[in-house]
Image: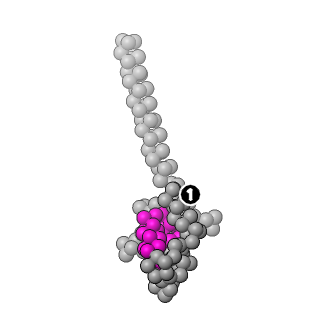
Amino acid sequence: MRFVWMAMMASALLVAGEDKAQSHKAAAKTTATVDRPAGVPADAQEIQPYLYRYTDAQGKKWLYRQTPFGLSKWEDKPVDAAAAAARAAVRGEPLRETSHAALIRVFLAEGNVSEAVREFTSYQALLRDELGLEPTRRLCRLIQNARNT
């Protein structure tokens, strides 16, 4: 009889231990999702602590930042605006190196090294064909550093 009682108690303790383990797992899951501030869409990517990037259904990019005063939201378009301005400068003066350098820097800021190299090689060919010159060492170093990273 004692053996049956001890077996029942042991199984009850094991079941209670499993319940506690499951409740700890559930608590861990809820604490993992608590880190995201309320109001930030679930599929937003955390790009820095408390800074999230989200693209909505229309393709607009938004940034969300948790501040001590609450959640702030703004449209993420500085790189797009910079790229448009640099392209306009290149169209306006196609032989000017500073406009091409600005466009290359925009591509590098986006992490688009291949597009930066393509822009450099097309500018290099244009400069050779039109003026028989090479890009400056500064622009060449910029591309070389980008290729090495």
Q: Is residue 106 visible?
A: no
Q: Dot 1 surroundings within 10 Å: few (below 14), some, or many (20 or more)?
A: few
Q: Is residue 83 above or below residue 39?
A: below
Type of amino acid at the residue the image marks with label 1: Pro
Q: Main secondary structure of the magenta part?
A: helix
Q: Is residue 2 above or below residue 147?
A: above
Q: Quadrant of the N terminus?
A: top left
Of the pair 40 and 117, the residue shown nearer to us = 117
Q: Going by the picture, which residue comes out furthest to the right? A: 68
Q: Position of residue 28 (x, y in %)?
A: 48, 44
Asked if residue 145 lies in the magenta stretch, the reply is no
Q: Position of residue 39 (x, y in %)?
A: 49, 66
Secondary structure, mark 1, is: loop
At 48% from the left and 83% from the top, the residue drawn is 94
Asked if residue 111 lies in the magenta stretch, the reply is yes
Disc 1 marks which residue?
Answer: 49
Q: What residue span does the magenta drawing correspond to?
A: 104-127
Q: Going by the picture, which residue comes out furthest to the front? A: 132
Q: Position of residue 31 (x, y in %)?
A: 50, 49
At 47% from the left and 53% from the top, the residue drawn is 33
Q: Position of residue 63 (x, y in %)?
A: 51, 69
